[in-house]
Amino acid sequence: MASLKLYMLDQSGNSYKVLLLAAFLGITLELIEVDMANDELHSPEFLAMNPRAQIPVLVDGDKTFTDSAAILIYLAGSYPNVGSTTTPSSFWSNDIAEQAAIVDWLAFATGWIHNGVAGARKVLNFPAKGFSMNDPLGPSTLETATAIGHKSLAMLQTRLCTNEWLALGRPTIADVAVFVYVALAHMGNISLEPYPAVTSWISRIKDLPGFIPMVGIDGPKH
């Protein structure tokens, strides 16, 4: 059986989303660190996999997925939870209405979160042109990213004041997709202190079995 290959970067929040879901589901990935110093993203070999020159990229045999949201859906829909004999995992659903509810939050992550807290983190920490997290369609200034970030956090606060999880009343890939850059908001000088329901939600995710940290996101405190 061919291994699942993930082309990724340690500092990439989108790569971490995939790593985190794989950890929750007990999926083994073959990790391939992309060589940014030598501009591997624009090598002919990488562009053949992803013409957009972005990470992460998941290769499963003859199937290739080049967007973190698509990868989350594929993994959660294809692999059951550890110890389960059913597909999909509880992080996804077979019900079309429930799928739509999850995808609604994936879109929120791609739009509001990407242009807000993730954008502020990028501006302050990864300003070099051509870095894999750089998006020419994203915010060009820290002020813009910060404003969008606080608006998105306010929306999350409203949702999480009355819901433990973003969709379906249980942890799903909606939570994984939104969580990462929100938990890294401090790297963009955006405080989560005004959003207590958001910080409680972050703690709940960190307490899920299998949680793994990344640089900027600590593990659970027990």
Image (tube, helix red, strand yellow):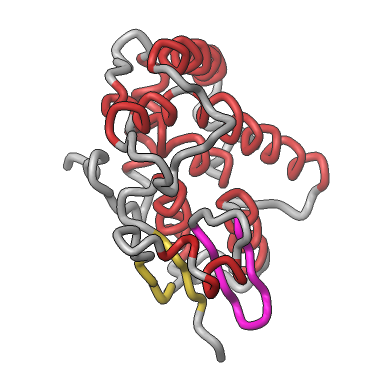
Please say whether residue 58 is one of the residues in the magenta stretch: yes
Q: How many marks on residues?
A: 0
Residue 148 image position (x, y, % from top left) = 50, 15
Please say whether residue 93 is one of the residues in the magenta stretch: no
Residue 61 image position (x, y, % from top left) = 62, 82
Say which of 149 and 153 sits in front.
149
**Residue 62 as seen in the image, left or right of residue 10:** right
Taking 128 as reference, is 208 above or below it? Answer: below
Quadrant in the picture for residue 65: bottom right
Magenta residues span 56-66
Taking 64 as reference, is 208 above or below it? Answer: above
Q: Quadrant of the C terminus?
A: top left
Main SS type for the magenta part? strand
Say which of 72 and 92 sits in front.
72
Say which of 43 and 201 sits in front.
43
Residue 31 image position (x, y, % from top left) = 38, 71
Q: Quadrant of the N terminus?
A: bottom right
**Residue 32 as seen in the image, left or right of residue 64:** left
| Residue in view at x 28 percent, y 34 percent | 125
| Residue in view at x 29 percent, y 27 percent | 124
Quadrant in the picture for residue 22: bottom left
Quadrant in the picture for residue 149: top left
Res 23 seen here: no
Res 158 seen here: yes
Say which of 75 and 89 sits in front.
75
Residue 30 image position (x, y, % from top left) = 41, 76
In the image, farthest residue toward the left: 222
| Residue in view at x 54 percent, y 56 percent | 53
